[in-house]
Amino acid sequence: METKPTEISSSKMFGGFNKRFKHFSPTLGCSMTFHIFFPPSPSPSHKFPVLYWLSGLTCTDENFIIKSGAQRAASADGVALVAPDTSPRGLNVEGEADSWDFGVGAGFYLNATQEKWKNWCMYDYVVKELPKLLSENFSQLDTSKASISGHSMGGHGALTIYLKNLNKYKSVSAFAPIANPINCPWGQKAFTNYLGSNKAEWEEYDATSLISKYKNVSATILIDQGEDDNFVQEQLLPHKFEEACRSANVPLLLRLQPGYDHSYFFISTFIDDHIRHHAQALNL
């Protein structure tokens, strides 16, 4: 099993390169792919800080790289982009592909505790395995300087991972995150199956619940939310997170964007602001 990443594609963009890699993940028990965008390098010894992007339901490591246009700002600001996949694949667990909002493409960036889904440990993959893999195999990356962002399910992942690892990430941002999953149908379905019926365990993966525990946030949390997003009232619940931040005195910039939906058209419109937000926190 090849744990060392193998390059499977490379495309030049804005002077840098989108590169896709494949490796065997001991954490997940299967082969995984991920993308890195390397900005143009000013010198052979230069090391780039890293912005991790976590994608949403049904996505792979490709959606953000192909659709967001983030490479333009990342190239200008000298930030490497790292986009992992959204779940284990190819394990053939019974029912893993029965619905679009659970199983394959729907890892929810947690560590499952239920035996059937024990390989669904995207939290450990993103927080532990991937950074170690990057630092050991890519000398042009400085993984000690890292920030995290994401969309929808990935926005949930970015917020919860950031809050629980404030020493590992300089900043966080999100587009239309599932901000209070314990109180929405997507989250309740995923958490019941992955984590069982213990609601206290659910709260460990809920940004709105976590904010009161992990208040020592230095950089402002940036969230963009489209006002014409069909999921905002039932699934995303940004105002619950806003209330929790206010109560905990945590700096949040929640921008409601009139007319925008849940898609990559929305993400690509505002991604430059997010790259800049992280570049500032990464001291660029």
Image: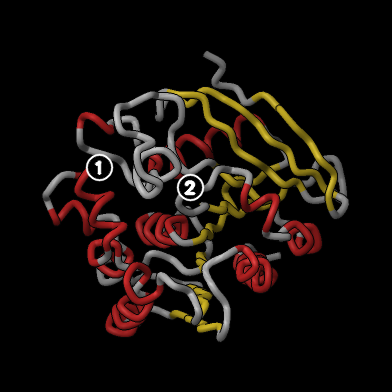
Dot 1 or dot 2: first in sequence order is 2
Looking at the image, which residue is at 23% across and 62% down? Answer: 182
Quarter in which the C terminus is drawn: bottom right
**Does 149 sit above or below residue 88?**
below
Q: From the viewer's perspective, is 16 left or right of 185?
A: right
Mark 2 residue type:
Thr
Looking at the image, which residue is at 73% across and 60% down? Answer: 69
Colour theme: secondary structure
Residue sitting nearer the eye, 83 or 57: 57
User: Residue 261 appears at what percent x and percent y?
Assistant: 54, 73
Looking at the image, which residue is at 27% across and 61% down? Answer: 185
Mark 1 residue type:
Tyr
User: Residue 90 appears at what percent x and percent y?
Assistant: 45, 25
User: Residue 44 appears at what percent x and percent y?
Assistant: 85, 40
Looking at the image, which residue is at 14% across and 56% down? Answer: 199
| Circle 1 Cα neighbour tier, 10 Å, few/some/many (<14 / 14–19 / ≥20) | many
Label for residue 20? none
Q: Tag 2, which secondary structure? A: loop
Label 2: which residue? 58
Q: Tag 1, which secondary structure? A: helix
Residue sitting nearer the eye, 279 or 242: 242
Question: Which residue in the rendered view is the most extreme toward the front?
Answer: 98
Q: Quadrant of residue 99?
A: top left
Label for residue 194? 1
Label count reads 2
